[in-house]
Image: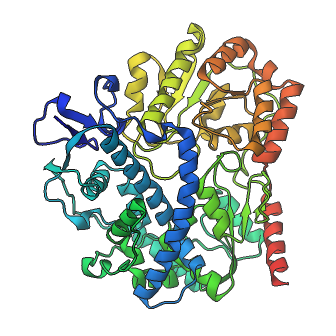
Amino acid sequence: MGKILVATGLESKKKIELKELLFLGDWCLNNNIDTNRFDVVNYHWNDRKKLFQDYKKLERVYELFLQILSDSLNKYHCKNLPISYWRILIGPWLETFIHTIFDRWEMMNKANKEYKINSMLSFINPKMEYFIPYDFDDYYLKIKSHNWNQFIYTYIGEFININQIESIELSLDNFKKRNYKNDFIKLCNVISNKINSKKNIFIYSRSIDFKSYLQMQFLLKQFPTIWNKVLSPRIFPNMNSRSKLLKGIKFDQDSFCKLLVNLIPIQIPTIYLEGFLELNEYSRIFLPSSSKLVVDSIAWFTDDVFKNWIALKKISSNTKYIISQHGGNYGTSLFNSTEEHQISISDSFLSWGWKDKRSKVLNLGTFNYQKQKILKKQKKIKLKIILIQGLNPKYSNFIFASPISTCQWRSYLNDQERFIKLLDKDIKKSLTIKLYKNNFQYDEESFFRKSFPNVKIYSKPKSLLNIINSFSIVVATYNATTFLETLMINFPTIIFWNNNHWELRDESKSFFNKLRQVGIFHDSSDSAAEFINRVSNDISGWWFSKELQIVREEFVKNYAKKITLKELSDHLKNYVEYKKK
């Protein structure tokens, strides 16, 4: 007798014996369930070599479909826009969508190949329109949900001829409150446009505080105006017109590409199709009429109104576009699709210090930490450790060198638990765990409380730098911004992670090896805990040693170099003058 496949964490209305069930992945099960008690398909990207190979393969698939979709959208909208325009506007959605669908596709085929599947659980009378996102923000919320993933897995199941058992009810909440904050932002942007519609240098998604922003405008000799992200108009899908989008595109020999041809017309956000005219109107009304240079750090990803605006300005006005690095992982991670995308769409990419063979990458440094002072000497305080946690959604969404999906993030959490267990008893009492800002249904606090009922947990949304002076040492556990910030300000820091899940690029390995030699970087929770046990009585003596400080300064120079607003403003003014020639 074949198995009944369970693809998500949604509950079935039909009672089925557990022995009949096959779970597609750890994301189907509650956090406190021992997965060894059930039949769970082994995650395909537990083979990290396969992950990297798939990443390279999907780069080619992305470029192929970007060209196909650019041609199709131009035809749909009666336009003749270049592929560079569509890369900026739809690139983030298309690339993450391809990564996401490939992951679901591989898991369904793996389950079907390795097990005898009789049928799978699916929705009772699902409404197709509910699963179509209206913009990138909506899409990025949907792909993390059980509902959307159930829809996709069901669609793939039908595509590969797996019988469906309609037993899952879809609960819809169609009531949407009016977003008065967005109305206020619209008003502010319109006023800013009236006051100063032509910005010589337009700094959009700023990462600096408001006071520093005003100072920056003064240095650039510009009248300060306030611009913020405006939410896209919400437009409903037209299923008849969507069916014609990729009509005539065929992939007889490639089943995955054939699946994409079927899925893209029913998944592309409405803002790129039915709402395209409204999108162009929003870009015209709520952003400057012209600018010689635009500086951005995060809008390139989710802000559809801005993406459309900058893509058009690059074509019509030859506006130059600079993207500045936002956070960590850049320059160190073996592969990161978002880094590649930012470099491809910008005229220049400002790194925090790392160099690259691509001429677009300028190792200028970061201007985000104007208020932070470099620690010269640490006051003698009682040992207090803060353990910084990271997480990603249970369902994968885009590929970079980090834990992917539920099973690998559970492995990450198990490493955290082991680290705490290996700390000496007295040191354990000095520990505070800072939870990630979004627990993605992992219920981190319960996980830690189960093993350590008395551990101190910090769950407030405050940034680390706002509370860091209450501690004597930071333990960073993932390749992101945290340890760059603490090394930059010279705060005692221990880093540890599983190198099998946080692969480093060759250019960065020598720098991490030096961090390892002075005790900052560790390849395992065991090594990190043992080291803290050893130096806990004299953190300052270890941290402010001459050898360690030389290594730290070299690392900061290459990955977290701090520059002043004056240096940045001079660079931007020189950039504008240079591009005139």
Picture coordinates of residue 270, whole percent (x, y)? 36, 74
* 245 to the left or right of 177: right
* 330 to the left or right of 309: right
Viewer-proximal residue, 259 or 84? 259
Viewer-proximal residue, 43 or 78? 43
Picture coordinates of residue 113, whole percent (x, y)? 33, 42
Viewer-proximal residue, 98 or 298? 98
In this picture, is 218 found above or below 123?
A: below
| Quadrant location of the C terminus in the rendered image | bottom right
Picture coordinates of residue 502, whole percent (x, y)? 61, 38
In this picture, is 102 found above or below 180?
A: above
Picture coordinates of residue 496, whole percent (x, y)? 64, 28
Q: Residue furthest top?
A: 425
Q: Is residue 31 visible?
A: yes
In this picture, is 383 found above or below 252?
A: above
Residue 481 location, quadrant: top right
Residue 14 location, quadrant: top left
Viewer-proximal residue, 233 or 168? 168
* 451 to the left or right of 56: left
* 454 to the left or right of 48: left
Q: Residue furthest left?
A: 14
Q: Residue at x 85, y 31 (%)?
A: 549
